[in-house]
Amino acid sequence: MSKTARSGGQAPRKVVIVAYDGAKLMDISGPLQAFSDACFEDGRPAYQVILASEFGGSVSTDTGVKLETVRLDEAVIASVDTLLVAGGDLIMPAAATASLRARLVDYLDRPRRLGSICTGAFVLAQLGVLDGREATTHWSACSRLERQHPTINIKPDAIFVTSGHIWTSAGVSAGIDMALAMIEDDLDHLAALTVARGMVLFLKRPGGQSQFSVELRQQMRDARGRFDDLHDWIRANLEADLSVPALAEAARMSPRNFARVYLREMGESPARAVEKLRTEAARRLLESAHDAIQVVARRTGFGDDERMRRAFVKTYGVSPQDYRRRFGHSQA
């Protein structure tokens, strides 16, 4: 029986999202929507979500949209299950949240679960609660967080990170991924999937997944879009011959010139790019399909599962079997 089914009569869990002037609207609204949509099996809301700020009242987000909040002292009087600190400006100085941190320090031991969204990790770091733990934040702020707090083990690629009862997420939309993972942890996979479907999310990304897909990394490198059509062709022909001569022909270039220009423009060899695209396609199949490992290897052009295993370990640090056990659809 699922956790949802066993929850008859259970009171909604209280989630407090801490906001302040300049906080990112989506850092707040994304998790707010996810938790608000989550229900017990009998249809009752599974969470009571409270927006809080240091002094209560209206706070102005980074978009200029104002949100009504309750005073932090009032929000945490009763039992709080989860306390989340929203992020703000990527270069927000510590002084901007000094007063808020002085208030928060009195409540850090109360929640069952403590977390941050995006650069909210800096607030937790400045309070010392991330010392000696793994954590993440927006990709562009990870190096700064690491410099300022060297005792934290920063995971710059992670969508979100759990370290005991403390959760940290990457930027903006990753806060939704973290909220969905919390819902799955509290209720069950179906409850989280129902919320994801309701929010029309294409995929609930696992915490260990990189903040950037292979496709996004390539788009960032290939700013002029010179090889966009080629990359689309590769994805549609993963089982084909994707040697340099074959790719050069598809790109209408000589093999020698293609290899040289591709390396210069993309920062990696064509062979490495093909391997990454095949690995990402395999990852998606491992998450969503029930095909045997050997079948996935064949469908994505690796030919045999050992070649796919080596590529998977190089890219994700785990074998395909271990990845499927952690993140596959069978975990439902």
Image: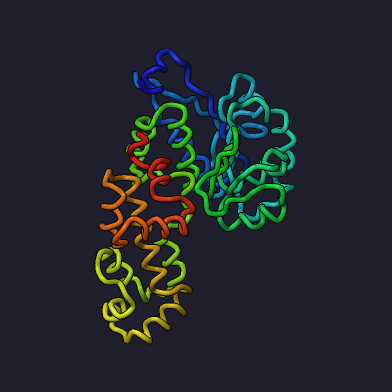
Quarter of the image with the C terminus is top left
Q: Position of residue 23 (x, y in %)?
A: 59, 45
Residue 58 visible in the shown view:
no
Viewer-closest of 127 and 304: 304
Q: Residue furthest top?
A: 9
Q: Residue at x 43, y 12 (%)?
A: 9
Q: Residue 330 in the image: state x and y as whole percent.
A: 33, 37
Q: Position of residue 51 (x, y in %)?
A: 55, 32
Tell me which residue sits at (64%, 57%) in the image.
143
The colour mode here is rainbow
Residue closer to the observer: 46 or 207:
207
Is 302 placed left or right of 92 in the picture?
left
The residue sitting at 67% across, 32% down in the picture is 55
Q: Quadrant of residue 162?
A: top right
Percent of width and height locating residue 148: 72, 53
> Compared with residue 256, is residue 218 higher up or lower down, i.e. above or below?
above
Q: In the rendered view, does 238 fall on the left or right side of 256?
A: left
Quarter location, residue 276 = bottom left
Quadrant in the picture for residue 311: bottom left
The quarter in which the N terminus is drawn is top left
Above or below 164: residue 259: below
Identify the residue at horizontal 61%, vertical 54% (top origin): 142
Does any portion of residue 141 appear in the rendered image? yes
Is residue 237 shown above or below 201? below
